[in-house]
Amino acid sequence: MASRDQTDIGGVQETFLTTHWSMIEGVRERQDKDQALIGLLLERYWKPVYCCLRRKGYGNEQAKDLTQGFFHEVVLNRKLVERADPSKGRFRSFLLHALNQYLIDEQRRDTAQKRIPQSKLVPLDIADPPSLPETTQELDAEACFNYAWKVDLLDRVLTELREWYMGQGMEVHWHIFRDRLIQPSLEDAEPPSLFQLCQQYGIENETKASNMLGTVRRQFQSVLKKHVRQTVVSGETAEEELREMFRFFEK
């Protein structure tokens, strides 16, 4: 196998507590990390929160206001930090619990936009809110939250993977992975044969194409593991999360 078929972009160390939980721990000590923390949480979780609210029956504008209000209240007002408990394992489960509690409190208040000072508003501009596919119509709000989280995580993983291979001049590697595994899985379609891919991309033979596909597949798994480990605090929880992700991707 050529050296370019032996790459490692996901990292080899099994690190936990690297992003979400560690930033929450840090914000307890440094006031100036508020904006960094809320920026991270907003980037990673606004879509799941928004989709969960829509599934609960809130309209588009109200869901956007509540999403913004939630991130303001649970982070800038310290509620999230005060209740954070890394021993619980899954950060998204903790965040979903906080969201449900926020909605209970919200029922006794005015809308989020009226309560938040203009200078404190979270920069949330949902010009094109995510829509849930028909397959999620029978899911409850919590299941929709988890579905949106998984979709967004996969999107970030695939974007990182694609950009790396394109940057390395290994476009054909990415195209084979995309055409053979990604698109057929997402579109529920029959994947092209290795012979067809060889013809399309000018690859020497099917063995070479298979090796290239295997290279990207391994890196996909590595990058996915890296992203999942940023939201848990133990290897056991990470493996459970990864099993769910792989089952989700295979659907």
Image (cartoon, helix red, strand yellow):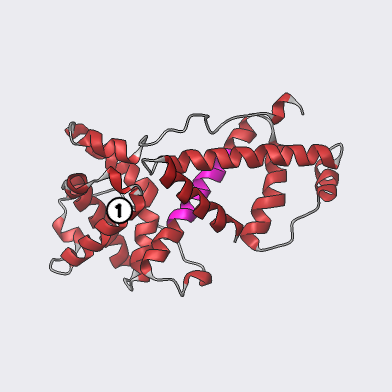
Residue 70 at x, y percent in the picture: 24, 56
Answer left or right for 14 relative to 63. Answer: right
Q: Name the secondary structure under disc 1.
A: helix
**Which residue range is magenta in the image?**
149-161
Q: Residue 122: horizontal and vertical position, in percent?
A: 26, 49
Between 247 and 119, the residue placed more toward the observer is: 247
Vertical order, 80 against 190 (above or below): above
Q: Which residue is mark 1?
A: 95
Q: Quadrant of the N terminus?
A: top right
Q: Residue at x 74, y 56 (%)?
A: 191
Kind of residue at badge 1: Leu
Please give left or right for residue 246 compared with residue 34 in the image: right
Horizontal relation, residue 78 to residue 156: left or right:
left
> Residue sitting at 73 percent across and 37 percent down?
212
Q: How many neighbours does mark 1 have within 10 angstroms: few (below 14), some (14-19), or many (20 or more)? A: some
Instruction: Determine if residue 10 is in view.
Output: yes
Q: Residue furthest front?
A: 236
Q: Main secondary structure of the magenta part?
A: helix
Residue 202 visible in the picture: no
Q: Does 157 lie within the magenta span?
A: yes
Q: Residue at horizontal 39%, vertical 41%? A: 234
Vertical relation: 107 (above or below) 42: below
Q: Choose top left, top right, bottom left or bottom right for residue 48.
A: bottom left
Task: Tell me where residue 19 appears, x and y as whole percent.
Answer: 36, 37
Q: Nearer the viewer, residue 90 or 179?
A: 90
| Residue 14 located within the stretch drawn in magenta | no
- Total tally of numbered discs in the picture: 1
